[in-house]
Structures are given as C-alpha cells and as structure tokens.
C-alpha cells in the first residue's frame, strides 16, 4: 500500500476513534446528569463496566446512524416535511434504545423522551468533533461537505472533474440595493463575506423592477423570461371570477405554464439545472421546496425532496430544531420589546407569524443552503435558490429593524458556507447574488388614516361598509397578509391550499367591488362591469369615486382606462398623465416616483387582467415611506422608495450586466436575458486551474 494511502487510512481511523471516544464520554456525562437515564444497574456497577457499556452503546448507536438512519428517513419522505423533522427525534431516540439493548450484559435504561434528548445531544457532539478534526484535512473536509449536503441521498457517482464553470444564482429575497450597500460598507460590515467579495471578485449593480415589485412577478420573469399579465402579487381575473395569488401552488403552476408558453423556452435552468426554495422551477429537472410543483407527486419533482437530504443527518436535524425553538423565543422577545419601546410604525406579530418566521429564518434557510451545497458538490451546471428569511422578517419588523440586521448577518454566513462548498466542487463555479426587489418602510394605510382601502372604496361606491377586520387577518382576497414563506410552510406540512376567497366573498356578491392589496399597490375590480371597465363607466356607475380616491392624501395616483385617451394616471386636484401621448395636465402624479415610472405603469396598463382601478399609495419624497394596503411595516409591490431598486452582485469574470454601454437594467425580463448570457459565457469559457485550491477530484 502506498505511503500516502496508509497515512490517509491511519488519519481516518484516528478520526473514527476520536469521535467514538467523544460519544462515549458524552453518554457517560448525560447518564450522570440526566434523571431517567442510566447505564448501570440499580445497585451500581464498576467504573470499568460502566465505561464498557457506554463505549459499546455509543459504538452501536454510531453504526445504526450510519447504516440504518438514511433508510428510515427515506421511508418517511412522504410524510409532511416539518412532521419529519419532529419524527427525527423519536427515530433517533429509538435507535439509541436499540443500541443500549444490544450491549452484552448492559443494563441501560431510559424513557423514550429521555432517549430522544440523549440521542440528539450525542449526535451534535459527534458531528461537532468530526467537523473540528476535518479542518486541516482536505479530503476529510470534502467528504464532510458532501455528507452535510445530503451526499448519501444522491444517486450514481460523483460528477467528473470539469474546467467548464457552473453557475449558482442565490436570491436574497427582498434585500434592496441601498440596504445592501449599507450592510457591506464601513469598517465592520454587517455582511463581511459579501463585503470581501464586492470590489475584489465581484461587482455590484442596481436594477429597476417592474411596477409590480414583488417576488411573483420578478422571479417568474427571471426564471422563465416573461411576467406578462402579472399585474400584482394577487389579482382578480374577470374571465374566470377567480383571485390569482402568486404563492398559491396551483396558481404558481398556472403562471409558470403561461410564462413558458409566452417565452417559448422551458426556463433558465433547463440545461442540467436545479431550483431550490423558489416559487417556480425555471425548467429545472431537480427541484426542492418549489411551490409550483408542490401539488405534484412526480418521482423526480417532489417539492419536499430537499428535506430528505437535510434530515438524513440527525445532528443537523437536532441543531435546526433547537434553532427553531430559539427563533420562536427570539421573535416573542423582540415583539414584546418593540411594544415596550413604543416603536412606530408597528404591526401585531402574533398568531401564526412566530412559527412562519422560524420556518423561514431557520428551516427554509438551512434546507435550501444544504440543497445548494449538494448541487455544487454534484457538479450541477446551473442552480437558482431563494432565501426568503430577510423578506419575511422585514415585513413585520421593518427593512432596517434590529431583527432584520440579525437575519442579514445569518444570510452572510450562508453565502460563506456555499463559497466553502465551491472550494471542494468537481468544477469551478460562478456565484451570482441577486435580489428580486427591495422593501419600503411606512405606516400602513389603515393605521395612518383610520380606514382601509376596501372601506374607502365601498363607501365611495354606495356599498355598505363592513366593520374593519382585525389586523393580521385575511384581506379582501381571503388571503392572510404575509409573504412567500406562509404557503411554503403549508406545503411542507401537506396542508391543503387556502381558498383565495371565502364562501360568499366579495367576488360572489354581484356588483360589489373586489379590493385587493399587494404591498402599497391596491387593485379594484367591478365584477358587474364586463371587461376592463373604463373611467367613464365607473364614473357613471359610482359618481365621485375616482375623485374621492385620487384626492385622498394616502394615495399617490390611480391608473384607469379612458375611452378617449387610453391609459390615464389620475392625481389629486384633477391632475392627469395621459400615458399614450405623454400629455400632462396639472402637476404630474408620477413625478414623485422618479424616472421610468411612466414606462412601468404604461406596460402594466396593457395587461389583459389589469384591475379596473390600480391604486398606488402616496410617497414621502424625503423619507421614502409608503403606506401598504396590507398589515406590513416593510412592503413592496408598487412604486415608491427602495422597493423598486434590486441588486445584482456578479463575478468580474463575467461580462458587465449592462453590456459594453453600461445601460441600466430595467425590468425582471432584462435580468433574465443577462443571466442567460452569463450561462452561455460560462459554457464557452473553460476556467484556468485554481492555484492553491483543493483538488476537485471525487473522493
């Protein structure tokens, strides 16, 4: 046997013995301090006998974890994903009881609950020891990265070495350009990994979103090349009488189908791609935690498949569960602190929100990161993943709240872990970071003016005004106010889709307006008026409504269709901006919203399913604050403030996003074109060998 092979075998044996010793000591200590767990008989045993039982028990437990555990988790893949996370503890505890019972002359005893805790602690201790021992061993580090990425769940052999770069697109949901500049600036940046990348290996570029500045429209265009006829996060389609919601699995599947038909291409990830944690697949064959396939049960397109790779490691499952509980406590404490400090603006943060936040900031983040690491170590050509943690917390705590700063720091560590995985990949990788929109802060419309948009519309159209709904309850669409993580969590629990409209809801009351909120963008439709109702028809049916809305101090402008002038933007005091000709009468209602506002509104005005009245909240030009029509402190979905400025952080090795001219990127469809260009460049340019980097050979 060669000397190098003997040395590697000896090092591996030493690591195994060290981990075994740590597990044995952990078991002994737990037997001493935990009531209900013992390794000796009631009348006592010698120290030698006690150590022997602990050593054999720890050894059997390690073997069962290595040989039996992956098959147990695979057998339970069809149960709800979050339930699988809870079953991990029971299964791990059961394996410990089996290991103790297998010890010759052993007298170990523990209740199932105690065994689950002991097993979790032992798994974490052994995993931590293995990690420390692998720090200086390149081969061991590579194998550890593969195990943590669910390597045991993959099929076939590791990908062969290649000099053709792969590309990872990592979306930091809701992180705007200005916010990122602050997070990576200064002597002690909040996101040090991104700060080190920016200006050295990567360039930072802003891009401007469409009028509908939200994940449904942006990600659909980025992944599938088209967000045509997506006017908002949720909207009412008169042709079907249904409310479409971007993060509802069946609606996401339909939007993906429509976009694919329009673009004539399956998507950005069609060539050996993987989609992780997204609303849409991007044409990828490998998907995990993707809502548009959450209702499918295909063998290769289970949206929860990524959970198996993650929970296959009992130590990781234990850490995530502990972090989940800690995040629940952190949210309760931070919400209470915000109330005691009298912070404004503020929205209630009770109900299911603490659970949804913990899911987004712990479970979804960890599972998606591990899935992407697995794709990198498998040599996948293109990967697109979405981390929704910041967006979810910022909706309730504000874009720059204390809570969100902690989330940004953790996202930076996720990027660092993926950069580490790239070091051990079988091919070089381009890591592209981007966002789908930013967030704008402000007091909600209802909190600021004491009336909801729906109440304002119903009063102006002669409809009875219902009492205000409690905060954090369903809005007019029947969909609870919230972000993308809510339906992702429901899919993980195998919960049926929520109806987009309660029985007897507004769309079913003939003549009653349907009022929906999408951040600070409001949509008003009149089911009793066929087709796209004109401003003249609305005025004839509901005299004074348009003027009442346009003159309201919380409303910046309205978009309507005039029979004479086509799409028209209405502002306070009778001001108009006729989009077809550019003619402006009075003070331009779009002027406060910056350059490009007219073009963005005109594009949406041409959509077949645009609402009869599109309402954009007012904007404070000094603070950038807007007023959401949902119960959100940080919002996005319309125009105003930082929500429309997203970012691209791309490797300098790739061409500039704006090309040779440096043109500004406008609209998510233009971002799709840039990302496809970069994939083509990566395929055409083999990378030079990386000096000093670990050899990417499979081991």
Image: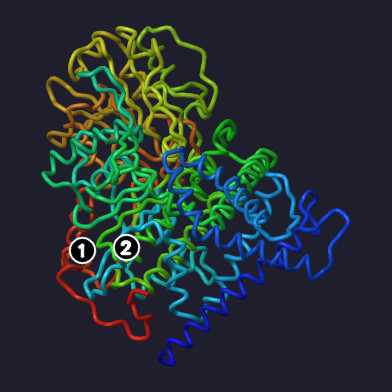
Q: Kindly indicate the quadrant of the structure image that contains residue 60.
A: bottom right
Q: Residues within 10 Å of mark 2 (few under 14, many from 20)?
A: many
Scheme of colours in the image: rainbow
Vertical side of 84 occupied by 123: above or below: below
Observer-nearest of 614 and 122? 122
Label placed on residue 678: 1
Dot 2 and dot 1 residues touching (CB under 8 Å): yes
Vertical side of 248 occupied by 52: above or below: below
Residue 229 position in % (x across, y down): 20, 33
Q: Quadrant of the N terminus?
A: bottom left
Residue 158 position in % (x across, y down): 31, 67
Label placed on residue 432: 2
Helix, strand or loop at mark 1: helix
Q: Quadrant of the C terminus?
A: bottom left
In whole angstroms, how far apart are the C-alphas of marks 2 and 1? 10 Å
Horizontally, residue 470 falls left or right of residue 489, namely right
Which residue sits at x=46%, y=62%? Answer: 148
User: Can the viewer see residue 668?
Assistant: no
Q: Kindly indicate the quadrant of the structure image that contains residue 675.
A: bottom left
Horizontally, residue 597 falls left or right of residue 395, namely left
Vertical side of 100 occupied by 620: above or below: above
User: Can the viewer see residue 39?
Assistant: yes
Which residue sits at x=46%, y=52%? Answer: 365
Residue 433 position in % (x across, y down): 35, 60
Q: Which residue is situated farthest in the bottom direction here? A: 3
Q: Kindly indicate the quadrant of the structure image that contains residue 477.
A: top left
Label placed on residue 412: none
């Amino acid at each position: 046997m060669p000397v190098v092979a003997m040395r590697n075998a000896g090092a591996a044996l030493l690591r195994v013995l060290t981990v075994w010793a740590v597990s044995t000591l952990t078991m002994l200590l737990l037997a001493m301090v935990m009531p209900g767990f013992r390794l000796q008989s009631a009348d006592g045993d010698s120290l030698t006998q006690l150590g022997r039982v602990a050593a054999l028990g720890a050894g059997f437990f390690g073997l069962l974890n290595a040989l039996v555990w992956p098959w147990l988790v695979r057998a339970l893949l069809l149960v709800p994903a979050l339930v699988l996370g809870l079953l991990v503890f029971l299964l791990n505890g059961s394996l410990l009881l089996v290991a103790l019972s297998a010890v010759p002359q052993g007298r170990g005893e523990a209740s199932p609950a105690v065994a689950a805790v002991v097993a979790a602690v032992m798994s974490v201790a052994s995993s931590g020891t293995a990690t420390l021992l692998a720090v200086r061993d390149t081969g061991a580090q590579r194998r550890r990265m593969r195990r943590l990425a669910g390597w045991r769940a993959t099929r076939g052999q590791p990908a062969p070495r290649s000099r053709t770069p792969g590309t990872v697109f990592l979306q930091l949901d809701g992180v705007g350009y200005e916010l990122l500049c602050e997070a990576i600036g200064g002597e002690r940046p909040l996101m040090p990994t991104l700060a080190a990348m920016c200006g050295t290996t990567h360039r930072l570029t802003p891009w401007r979103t469409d009028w509908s500045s939200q994940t449904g429209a942006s990600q659909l265009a980025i992944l599938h090349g088209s967000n045509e006829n997506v006017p908002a996060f949720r909207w009412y389609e008169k042709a079907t009488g249904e409310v479409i919601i971007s993060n509802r699995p069946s609606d996401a599947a339909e939007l993906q189908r429509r976009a694919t038909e329009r673009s004539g291409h399956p998507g950005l990830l069609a060539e050996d791609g993987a989609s992780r944690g997204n609303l849409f697949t991007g044409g990828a064959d490998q998907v995990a935690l993707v809502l548009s396939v959450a209702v499918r049960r295909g063998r290769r397109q289970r949206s929860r498949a990524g959970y198996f790779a993650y929970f296959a490691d009992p130590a990781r499952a234990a850490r995530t569960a502990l972090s989940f509980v800690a995040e629940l406590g952190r949210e309760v404490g931070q919400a209470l602190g915000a109330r005691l400090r009298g912070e404004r603006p503020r929205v209630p943060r009770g109900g299911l929100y603490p659970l949804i936040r913990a899911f987004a900031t712990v479970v979804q983040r960890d599972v998606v990161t591990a899935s992407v690491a697995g794709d990198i170590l498998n040599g996948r050509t293109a990967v697109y993943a979405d981390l929704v943690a910041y967006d979810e917390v910022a909706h309730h705590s504000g874009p720059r709240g204390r809570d969100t700063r902690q989330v940004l720091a953790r996202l930076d560590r996720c990027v660092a872990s993926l950069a580490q995985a790239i070091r051990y990949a079988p091919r070089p990788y381009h890591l592209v970071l981007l966002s789908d929109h930013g967030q704008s802060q402000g007091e909600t419309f209802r909190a600021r003016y004491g009336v909801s948009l729906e109440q304002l519309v119903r009063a102006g159209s002669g409809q009875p005004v219902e009492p205000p709904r409690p905060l954090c309850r369903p809005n007019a669409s029947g969909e609870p106010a919230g972000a993308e993580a809510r339906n992702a969590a429901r899919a993980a629990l195998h919960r049926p889709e929520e109806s987009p409209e309660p029985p007897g809801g507004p769309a079913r009351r003939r003549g009653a307006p349907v009022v929906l909120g999408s951040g600070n963008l409001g949509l008003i439709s009149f089911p009793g008026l066929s087709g796209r109702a004109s401003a003249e028809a609305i005025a004839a049916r509901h005299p004074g409504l348009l003027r009442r809305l346009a003159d309201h101090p919380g409303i910046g402008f309205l978009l309507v269709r005039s029979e004479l002038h086509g799409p028209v933007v209405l502002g306070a005091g009778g001001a108009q901006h006729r989009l077809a000709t550019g003619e402006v009468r009075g003070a331009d209602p779009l002027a406060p919203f910056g350059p490009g506002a007219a073009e963005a509104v005109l594009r949406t005005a041409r959509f077949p399913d645009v609402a009869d009245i599109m309402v954009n909240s007012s904007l404070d030009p000094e603070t950038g604050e807007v007023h959401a029509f949902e119960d959100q402190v940080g919002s996005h979905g319309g125009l105003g403030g930082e929500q429309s400025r997203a970012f691209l952080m791309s490797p300098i090795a790739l061409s500039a996003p704006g090309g040779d001219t440096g043109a500004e990127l406008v609209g998510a469809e233009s971002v799709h074109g840039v990302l496809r260009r970069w994939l083509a460049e990566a395929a055409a340019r083999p990378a030079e060998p990386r000096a000093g980097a670990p050899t990417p050979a499979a081991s």
